[in-house]
Image: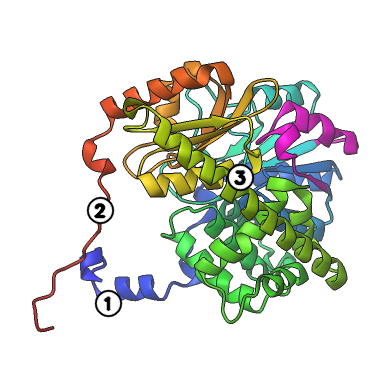
Amino acid sequence: MEQRGFHGQEEQERFLQPRLRDLSDPLRLPDMEAAVRRVKEALQRNESILIYSDYDVDGMSSSALLYRFLIKLGARVRVFIPERMSEGYGLSLGGLERALEGGATDLVLALDCGTTSVGPVSSLREKGIDVVILDHHELPEDGLPPANVMVNPQKGTEDRYLATAGIVFKFCHAFLKLEQREDLFDLKQHLDFVALGTVADLVPLEHDNRILVRYGLEQMAATAHVGLRALMQTAGVRGAPSPSTVGYMLGPRLNASGRLAEALSGWKLLTTHDPVEADGIAKELDSLNRERQRLEAGVVEEALEMVENLPEEQRKRCLVLASRQWHQGVIGIVASRLQRKYHLPTIVISVDEQGRGKGSGRSLPGCSMMDALRANHGFLGKFGGHPMAAGLEIEEKQVDAFREAMNRWVEGEIAREVFAPSLEIDMQLPSGH
């Protein structure tokens, strides 16, 4: 423990045995109190609330938690999750058009998206619809969208490791704290959702994340949510869940709905109270996950061959691969696999029949994917994400030039030792021990 920087028995015990009471104050997140105040006003006025969330596990978990919370408080609320293929990532104009068809809307709560959505947020405000964003993605350099409130830890210096599931947990906690009515909703019973989104989104398991995941996994083992129970049973989870359980067994099955079918089905699984419906959705997701594995294997095989056929200077420091044959729903997973194999930042792009490409990038510590994309934004339509993972849009005719530019930028800006696989050693033990 001393080697890891934890000095003294009290500090070491706090790390090894974290407690819920050690969680940081939720109100220290930027603009959290303003977000609570706006949602409270919506409840008092009986306004119609739309939760618009991303289609990955973090988005589904976040929207499931917030939906259950607001329903418990008596809100008029509905949930919308965009279709990956037709409406794209995040808060998009196409997604909003379909979302608003569901009825009159006074307030949009954007979860796990919205930080870079200047156009869509402006469109909502022009329609007289207020917007509150709860997100953790990196801030754009060219200005924030005109939301009424944005809670994003990247605006401050604290809690920047949180996934959106953790931010939504903090929002609920802040609401109950300000109301001085923690009896209104049992947040502890929903820590399983928080652990699900936090682990699946691959954010660092440090500080509050460690606490939320530890107690969330305990809650998951005895979950009261029939959908999560059905998912664990279908996935073959035995015994106490672990981060690996979430990362390799539960997360991929939930993600399969957003990758290959209707993303809302994963959310329905997390919010249903009907065991029969839960069992049916869980089996459907299991089947979709097997199809995802089949598609992924085919794309990986083609991508590996493509890498070997690239000129050396176009694959020396960054991999950029594109094809019209690749399913958009698996390119992120393929990018992750190639990044691990070659230990290089990797971008995999699926191109449609009109020559429009949507790509997913994965990087490695010491090489920010977002910095690289900002430096080469002239080739792109739009982009967003984290230092280690990002999404982008690009025209097919720009891919070759973009590949060359990315390799030049990484070669010139990133230290060579970043690309050398390393093994961290805490200490050396003398022989005989």
Distance from disc 1 to disc 3, alpha carbons, whole Å, reads 46 Å
SS state under label 2 = loop
Residue type for callout 1: Gln
- In this rendering, the label closer to the viewer, 1 or 2: 2
Determine if residue 197 is in view. yes
Image location of residue 122, percent across then percent down:
70, 22
Q: Earlier in the sequence, mark 1 or mark 2?
A: 1
Q: Which residues are magenta?
A: 78-106
Q: Of the residues tagged 1 and 3, which is closer to the observer?
A: 3
Q: Quadrant of the N terminus?
A: bottom left
Q: How much space separates mark 2 and mark 3, taking CA atoms?
A: 28 Å
Q: Are the residues at dot 1 and dot 2 in contact (C-beta closer than 8 Å)? A: no
Q: What x and y, as percent, mark residue 422?
A: 25, 53
Vertical placement of residue 272 versus 352, above or below: below
Three-letter amino acid code of the residue under disc 2: Ser
Quadrant position of residue 412: top left
**Which residue is the site of mark 1?**
9
Name the residue beneath numbered marker 2: 422
- Residue 330's disc number: 3
Q: Closer to the camera, 167 or 229?
A: 229
Find residue 345 and report its horizontal and vertical position in percent: 40, 38
| Residue 84 is inside the magenta segment | yes
Q: Nearer the viewer, residue 72 or 394?
A: 394
Q: Is residue 286 magenta?
A: no
Query: Left or right: where does residue 266 sit relative to residue 99?
Result: left
Q: Amino acid at mark 3?
A: Val
User: Would residue 364 appear left or right of 278 to someone viewing this image?
Assistant: left
